[in-house]
Amino acid sequence: MRRPVIGIIGNMYLINDEYPTHAAGTMNSAAVAEVAGGLPLIVPTDPALVDIDELMEVCDGFVFTGARPNVHPEEYGHAPTEAHGAFDRGRDGVALPLIRACVDRGQPILGICRGFQEVAVAMGCTLHPEIRDLPGRDNHRMPPDGTLEEKFEMRHVVTVSEDGPFQQIWGKTEVLTNSLHGQGIMEASDRIVIDGHAPDGTPEAIYVKDAPGFTLSVQWHPEWQAGIDPVSRPLFEAFGQAARDWVSRKQQPQKLTA
């Protein structure tokens, strides 16, 4: 059986502040290829360039990556403020309808950081622009200084529910993760199950209720050292298996009806 094709949602960047580029971090591609066992394919996030139905035919699963720009608050009925930061409306226009279509179809998705927030918003949740401003919450943002290793170091425990899908992957209810995000879920919809929390109560692991396929999403960055991290590796392996299962179903001959 061929490797599943995994669409990695790209981001818009300006090289040298003038040359527009769609790109995704190499850590994401490496995690998809080396741990999930898929063929990584970066998806340009411009609704004028891609078609959702065609994307879903080409790709067998999708990774919704982290990014500096945030989901525009208009997508969940809030007015934009300075605290919401920068936006990428092109990515909003591709990622949100793609998530909804994949959930409906049962096609596997994995949300990471901004991708976690995209899954939440696509399923009806609202976001708080700066969770460190909430009473009793910690600062979950990436440290502004230091090496890459220091920025991605493990910073807090996440506790997941007993017998939930994350516990089934890891075999335990407490895992150690990094933390590089500013926003977080404010109000959860009835479509989203918050399965894991940080010690301060911040939602960190979710999935879509009653979805027919793989919809696990995490607020941290499991692509960092995914091949050796005891939390990241099983998560990407489970996603890869879900994508291979999707390929198997696609390759099964269709039954003819009279």
Image (cartoon, helix red, strand yellow):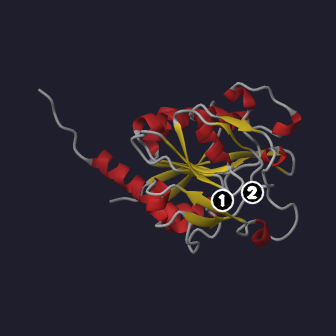
Measuring 85% from the left and 32% from the top, which residue is drawn there?
Answer: 81
Horizontally, is 227 left or right of 71 in the view? Answer: left
Q: Nearer the viewer, residue 96 or 176?
A: 176
Q: Residue at x 58, y 68 (%)?
A: 226
Can you say whether 15 is above or below 77 in the image?
A: below
How many numbered marks, from 0 up?
Answer: 2
**Which amino acid type is shown beneath numbered disc 2?**
Leu
Q: Depth check: give the residue in front, 150 or 208.
A: 208
Q: Which mark is residue 221?
A: 1
Outermost residue toward the front? 136
Provide residue 73's location: percent of width, then percent of height: 74, 31
Crowd tier of the residue under label 2, counting other residues whose Cα lies within 10 Å: few below 14, some 14–19, many 20 or above: some
In this view, the residue in front, 35 or 143, is: 143
First along the sequence among labels 2 and 1: 2
Does dot 2 land on a helix, a strand or a loop? Answer: loop
Number of the label disc, if any, that sits on residue 21: none
User: Which residue is under mark 2?
Assistant: 180
| Residue that appears at 51% across and 35% down | 191
Number of other residues with Cα within 10 Å of mark 1, as a class: few under 14, some 14 to 19, many 20 or more: many
Residue pictured at 79% horizontal, 59% vertical: 142
Kindly check if marks 2 and 1 are in contact, taking CB atoms under 8 A apart as contact: yes
CA gap, disc 2 to disc 1?
Answer: 7 Å
Q: Position of residue 27 (x, y in %)?
A: 64, 63
Position in image of residue 30 (x %, y %): 58, 65
Q: Is residue 154 visible?
A: yes
Quarter of the rendering occupied by the N terminus: bottom left
In which quarter of the view is residue 47 placed?
Answer: top right
